[in-house]
Image (cartoon, rainbow, N blue to C red):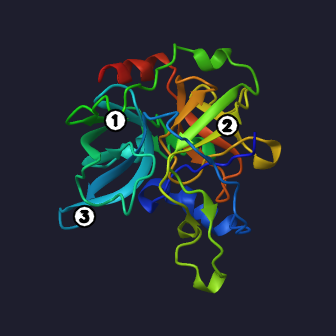
Amino acid sequence: MKKFTLAVRYVLASLFVALALALVFSMVGSANAVTNGEPDAGHHPYVGLAVFDVLDEDGNQVPSHRCSAALLSPTVVLTAGHCTDGTVAARVWFDEVVQGNPEYPFSGATSYDGIAYTYPGFCIGCGNGLPGFAAGDVGIIVLSEPVPTNVVSEYAILPEEGLVDTLKNKTPIDFVGYGVQFQAQIPGNQLPQPPPFYRWTGPRQRMFAPSELVSGNFVHSDEFLRLAMNPGGGSGGTCFGDSGGPDLLGDTDIVLGVNSYVTNVNCAGVGYSFRIDTSEVLAWINTFL
C-alpha cells in the first residue's frame, strides 16, 4: 500500500488564535508537497464537508470556514467544537468531490442545511501549550431534513465507553476528510498574507489515509488521541480542512475521535484528536440521537 497524507482543516484566525500565529512565525518550512491521500471511492459515504456561517459586523449571515464531519444518523452530524463554536448555521455536502466554491450558495442541490451545537465543556486556550488548544473539542450539526438513503445509506458508529484505553500502540487508524492535500509552489515574495495557510491547496475531495495510534500517557491523554502523521514511515496524516473529521478504528466505521489540531504548519509528526469515547461526551452526543 502506498504512503498517504491527508488533509485536516482550513485554519481561521478566529479559531486558531495565538496558536496559529505562533506556528506561522516560528515554523514556516519547506514548501515541498506532502504525499497525496487516496480518493475514498465511496468507502466512507457518511463523511461530509461542512461549511459554517457566522454573523459579520453588520449582522449579515456569511460563510466563514469549512471542516470535515461524519453522519451518525439521517439528521445528526459529528464534527469538532472549534468548527461549530460561534456559528449560526451550517451546510453539509456528501459528494465525493464538492465542485466549485462550497461556501456558496447558502443552500444547494446537494447540500443539507443545519444548526450547529458545541459541547458545553468546549474552550479554546484553556491550558498552556498545544494540549491546551481546545478543551472539549466536539460539536454536532442537526440537519433540518434527513439525508436520503440513496445519498448515504450507512453511518459512522459511536464507540463503546473507554474503548481508546484498551487499544495498543500502533493500532491502525483510518483518516477520512476533505482537507487540503499539498502545498503549492509559490515564491515567497508572491505568497498571500498571512502565510502559510493560503499555500495549502487541493480539490475538495473526500480522501482516505491510514495511520497509527501513538499510545501512552501524555498531557490530556484522557481527552485526546495522539496519531502518527509520518508519510516516510508509512502512516498518513491530516491537515487544514480535516478538522472535525472522524478518526476511525482501522477497517471499521467506529469513530474514536474527531481531528482537533496539528503541531506544525507542515502537518507532519503527530496530530491530536479529541476522544469521543468518554462517558460525558457520549452522553452529550446521544442527546441528539
For mark 1, what is the residue?
151
Q: Is residue 74 left or right of residue 59?
A: right
The relative height of residue 105 versus residue 1 in the rendered view (above or below) is below
Q: CA distance from mark 2 to mark 1?
A: 25 Å
Is label 2 in a helix, a strand or a loop? strand
Depicted 18 relative to depicted 188: above or below: above
The mark closer to the camera, 2 or 3, is 2
| Of pointers 2 and 3, the one earlier in the residue sequence | 3
Mark 1 Cα shell of 10 Å, populated few (<14), some (14-19), many (≥20): few
What residue is disc 2 on? 210
Task: Say if 188 sits above or below 38 in the image.
Answer: below
Q: Kindly identify the amino acid type of the residue bearing the numbered disc 2.
A: Pro
For this rendering, which residue is in front, 144 or 256? 144
Mark 1–mark 3 Cα distance, whole angstroms, equals 33 Å
Which residue lies at the image location 66% right of the left edge and 82% below the top edge? 187
Q: Which residue is mark 3?
A: 56
Using the image, tell me which numbered label, if any, was put on residue 274. none
For the point 50% across and 34% down, the residue is 44
Rounded to the nearest whole Å, what is the CA distance between mark 2 and mark 3? 38 Å
Q: Is residue 48 left or right of residue 103?
A: right
For the C terminus, the quadrant is top left
Kind of residue sitting beneath label 1: Val
Q: Nearer the viewer, mark 1 or mark 3?
A: 1
Q: Amino acid at mark 3?
A: Asp
Report x, y in % for residue 160.
52, 13
Give the farthest residue toward the left.
59
Q: Position of residue 242 (x, y in %)?
A: 52, 47
Question: x and y percent of residue 164 in the render?
Answer: 62, 20
Residue in the image at 67% along x and 37% along y: 210
Q: Quadrant of the N terminus?
A: top right
Q: Secondary structure at mark 3?
A: loop
